[in-house]
Amino acid sequence: MRNQQATKLLFEMSRSGRRAHHLPALPTTAESATSLLPADQLADAPPPLPELAEGDVVRHFVNLSTLNMSVDTHFYPLGSCTMKYNPKRNERMASLPGLVDVHPLQSDRSIPGVLQMLYELQQMLGEIAGLPGVSLQPAAGAHGELTALFVAAAYFAERGETERTVVLTADSAHGTNPASAQIAGFSTRTVKSGANGLVDVEDLKSKLDDKTAVFMLTNPNTLGLFDSQVQEIADLVHSAGGLIYLDGANMNAILGITRPGDFGADLMHFNPHKTFSGPHGGGGPGAGPICVRDFLADYLPGPVVEKDGDEYRCVTPTKSIGRVRSFFGNVGVLARAYIYIRTYGKEGLRRVSEDALLGANYLLSKVRHILDVPHGDRCMHEFVASATRLRKEKHLSAMDLAKRLLDYGFHAPTVYFPLVVDEAVMVEPTETESKETLDAFAEALFRITEETGDTIELAPHSTVISRPDDVAAARKPILRWNSEES
Ligand SMILES: *Cc1c(COP(=O)(O)O)cnc(C)c1O
């Protein structure tokens, strides 16, 4: 009930003559609008804006802002997305005048501090990845995938290996992998997972040939499993002449523990908005820095920051694929990543991942008694349960479970991804949640599975709208109020 008022349109609350401020009437001088603009450009009536007191407007927007769940208000175990709590301190530091008042067209010599920060971030990301060539330009994880595939294409083109037109993706991969490959001009083939949820190496072998350009691998994969065959996989792909791309969305599981470059990856992206406290959601801005092996570094987009003695300067790599983003990329998001990494340091970053693994395994050990967890006894930073039993016993779906969790005050986990699990419920608790929160979440899951079918089927009961048409909401959003239509 608390929020019902917020769903009223300001227009419905409008009362003629009500005002936030009373301004003095405009003087009618020769300089008035009527004399400056042609008559046919003037509106004959004022626009039909709502008339309200300031207090009503403030309450309206503050209440509206509480209708969505967020990391700042609720536990948000959205698997694959790593919705961890981002320290407010990082926001404050990223808003320091030395960062936000810089103009992108200033000369390199006038912004040594920003260049030093970007240079050091390149170095640190290269170190975490075990891949020394770094570009901070891409604006999101998916954009990083696309950029890295352009880099791979440029590399093969220069070697005259133009027959390498196929990108292999795992069947548990994020949809952005095949999509990026298509946009970069490759065709895609899917490599199956075995019953254990890991890459089916025999299937991979059968699909490797002299057309293979890149195998896009997610490790730990989207089932939350570390693929221990990764060295063998990398050897197979490399001996077929292909490259390994590592989808780095799951780096939160392995920071400081292992490095993609050490287990065979040639190119990868980071998602700073998942791993390094970038703001997440709302459509950006994000960032998707990529790291590559040294033999691929010359193809990276510019500018790359180099250090020459005490000076920092921007260079464009010699065989660069060109720019993929204006200026330096989204510096505000990169600044948060820099602050996050510098704050934790080497040991701290490793602790982040160890705690993420601990939290996920603790929750897994509880959830296992409530839902089926088809793959793995242990997990990395996330796990994928299945609601198949709920469907068989109560005709309920993963979506029903997700919706009912909202009534218990939890953001829903990711559902129906990855596609290799029936009625998938993908849970990523992250290292920033307490044991009490994880216990409460497991308890809520348990209580829901004990409830009657209709309670769950009609859920959520506590939100302003219950089950919107997701597709229509995304494809045909209503973003504009029109006085004629209402
Ligand atoms: C989030 C994610 C991506 C895409 O990253 P964006 O920054 O959202 O573009 C790719 N792969 C996986 C596994 C992801 O979870």
Image: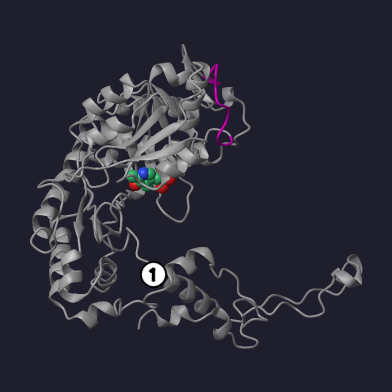
In reply to whether residue 317 is colored magenta, the answer given is yes
Our reading of the magenta stretch's main secondary structure is loop
**What residue range appears in magenta?**
313-326
**Residue 383 % position (x, y):** 20, 51
Q: Along the horizontal axis of the image, is 237 left or right of 360?
A: right
The residue where tag 1 is placed is: 66
| Picture residue at 33% right of the left edge, 37% below the top | 248
Q: Along the horizontal axis of the image, is 431 left or right of 338?
A: left
Quarter of the rendering occupied by the N terminus: bottom left
Against 60, is 150 above or below?
Answer: above
| Picture residue at 42% right of the left edge, 45% below the top | 176
| Picture residue at 66% right of the left edge, 80% below the top | 483
Question: Foreground residue, 148 or 163?
Answer: 163
In reply to whether residue 63 is colored magenta, the answer given is no
Q: Along the horizontal axis of the image, is 276 left or right of 48?
A: left
**Residue 379 % position (x, y):** 16, 45
For label 1, the SS is loop
What kind of residue is marked 1? Thr
